[in-house]
Image: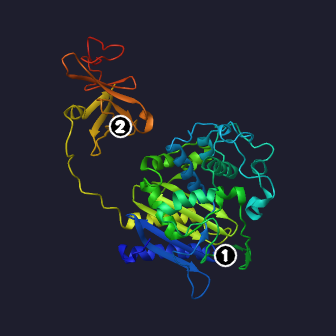
């Protein structure tokens, strides 16, 4: 993916460079490389390094750790879309005898399976995968630490199991399936399970002295689907575009949207932090923005991918140190810098090419009891319902083609909105999941449950 540095103002480019320079210096990172994506392409790339005369470019590989999980989730969603599996299927249906078979595929994707966070000792990230040749070596004697489906508990073994599921259903190694079904179609030719030159070496930085220690770079074996991949800012920029828009060669926009939708019950601390987890993607509210993406770490490496759909801005940040700069903050700041300095220019407003008269009749003001709502038709052929004032239940709706509408989000997700007509064909009210919406508060001419007092509205003397 080519970079056009002229797409951003000089002041914006300097602010981006300043942010990563501070991160590399204060985080004491041997190197740090970053990219910003807008409008489907890289508009800025920057790097800082401790090596004089050399700076990593957009083609230098770094280990990306748990961003690998998002790639694995894409493979699982592909199997679902092909009808090979259902996300509500229990693991036992495909991989019997693991001890975690009660968990569903969706729960494994969302880290609600109840599995432990890590595999049994020794520390899997710094030891060869050959020490864990079977799933039982990864899961241990008692795989489940929590009741299945009850809480979000991040689990690396859970994604190991999903990788094994992919191998079982595809009849090929996880890395081969990933290359064939995701990396090659998306043009991610610098993303691989094993490092390919040029690549950065991984380092540990002493917490109390400015000295380095090389970190081992192990093949993770069965744990690979949880964190094996190496990639570049250029490739992850392409992947960010895919996660925003979808690509029918790999996964539809609808399925990618499903990945971005929170799917796990948050812990109390998550609620306070404004974070959630979808199907292989992290969701976070930061600085008033909804951000999706994933972070990653392995000994010697840190990685972050951050996407703001509303701003059409994404950021990739990679570094080769075990700890140091907080890349989730760096990524969010890069998005904020561009979005605030050069806000997205909206597409011109255009009228709808055509409109259904019956649908147009629904537009306007409605009342649920005494609560005022506005129903608007949208340019995509759908509709939106939202409170006239303040916060409240709101949703977008999809037309079903038979005069009814289905809610797409919020309280009314999946609920049916049905216009109800009088015998003469005139519109009486809307039925939304049994709630009656009328043109006037408690309209006596509509079928309001419980009836309307025949004496009507009154005052009090």
Q: For mark 2, give the secondary structure.
A: strand
Q: Name the residue under label 1.
A: 201
Q: How many labels does the image show?
A: 2
- State the residue lying farthest toward the bottom: 53
- Residue 191 to residue 224: above or below: below
- Residue 243 to residue 103: above or below: below
Residue shown at 49% from the left, 49% from the top: 260
Residue shown at 64% from the left, 77% from the top: 30
On the image, the x and y values in percent for residue 138 come to: 75, 51
On the image, the x and y values in percent for residue 273 come to: 57, 51
- Report the side of 121 relative to 267 (left or right): right
Q: For mark 1, give the secondary structure.
A: loop
**Residue closer to the observer: 314 or 399:** 399
Q: Mark 1 or 2 closer to N-term?
A: 1
State the mark number for residue 318.
none
In which quadrant of the rendered image does the N terminus lie? bottom left
Work out whether residue 456 can be spotted.
yes
**Residue closer to the observer: 430 or 368:** 430
User: 10 Å neighbourhood of mark 1: few (<14), some, or many (≥20)?
Assistant: many
Residue 228 found in image quarter: bottom right
Work out whether residue 386 can be spotted.
no
Q: Do residues under tags 1 and 2 come within 8 Å of each other at their CB atoms? A: no
State the mark number for residue 397.
2
User: Marks 1 and 2, Cα distance to the nearest angstrom?
Assistant: 50 Å
- State the residue lying farthest toward the front: 171
């Amino acid at each position: 993916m080519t970079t056009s540095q002229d797409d951003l103002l000089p002041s914006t480019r300097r602010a981006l460079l300043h942010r990563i320079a501070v991160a590399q210096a204060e985080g004491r990172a041997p190197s740090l490389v970053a990219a910003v994506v807008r409008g489907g392409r890289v508009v800025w790339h920057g790097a800082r390094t401790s090596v004089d005369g050399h700076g990593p470019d957009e083609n230098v590989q770094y280990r990306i750790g748990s961003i690998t999980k998002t790639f694995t989730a894409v493979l699982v969603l592909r199997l679902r879309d092909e009808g090979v599996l259902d996300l509500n299927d229990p693991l036992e249906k495909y991989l019997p005898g693991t001890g975690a078979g009660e968990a569903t595929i969706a729960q494994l994707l969302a880290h609600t399976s109840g599995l432990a966070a890590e595999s049994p000792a020794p520390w899997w990230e710094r030891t060869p995968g050959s020490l864990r040749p079977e799933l039982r070596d990864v899961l241990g004697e008692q795989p489940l630490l929590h009741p299945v489906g009850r809480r979000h508990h991040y689990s690396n073994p859970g994604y190991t199991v999903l990788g094994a599921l992919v191998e079982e259903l595809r009849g090929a190694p996880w890395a081969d399936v990933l290359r064939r079904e995701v990396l090659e179609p998306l043009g991610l030719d610098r993303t691989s399970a094993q490092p390919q030159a040029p690549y950065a070496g991984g380092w540990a930085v002493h917490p109390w002295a400015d000295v380095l220690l090389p970190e081992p770079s192990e093949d993770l074996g069965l744990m690979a689907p949880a964190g094996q991949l190496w990639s570049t800012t250029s490739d992850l920029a392409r992947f960010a575009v895919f996660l925003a828009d979808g690509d029918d060669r790999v996964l539809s926009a609808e399925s990618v949207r499903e990945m971005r939708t929170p799917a796990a019950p948050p812990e109390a601390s998550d609620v306070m932090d404004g974070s959630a987890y979808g199907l292989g993607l992290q969701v976070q509210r930061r600085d008033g923005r909804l951000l999706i993406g994933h972070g990653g770490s392995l000994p010697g490496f840190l990685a972050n991918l951050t996407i703001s759909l509303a701003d059409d801005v994404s950021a990739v940040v990679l570094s080769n140190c075990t700890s140091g700069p907080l890349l989730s903050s760096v990524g969010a700041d890069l998005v904020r810098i561009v979005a605030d300095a050069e806000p997205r220019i909206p597409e011109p407003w255009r009228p709808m090419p055509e409109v259904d008269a019956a649908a147009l009749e629904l537009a306007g003001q409605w009342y649920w009891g005494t609560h005022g709502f506005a129903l608007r038709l949208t340019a995509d052929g759908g509709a939106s319902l939202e409170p006239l004032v303040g916060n409240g239940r709101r949703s977008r709706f999809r037309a079903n083609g038979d005069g009814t509408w289905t809610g797409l989000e919020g309280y009314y997700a999946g609920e049916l909105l049905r216009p109800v007509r009088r015998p003469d064909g005139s519109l009486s009210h809307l039925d939304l999941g049994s709630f009656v919406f009328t043109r006037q508060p408690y309209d006596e001419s509509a079928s309001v449950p419980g009836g309307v007092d025949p004496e009507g509205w009154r005052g009090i003397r």
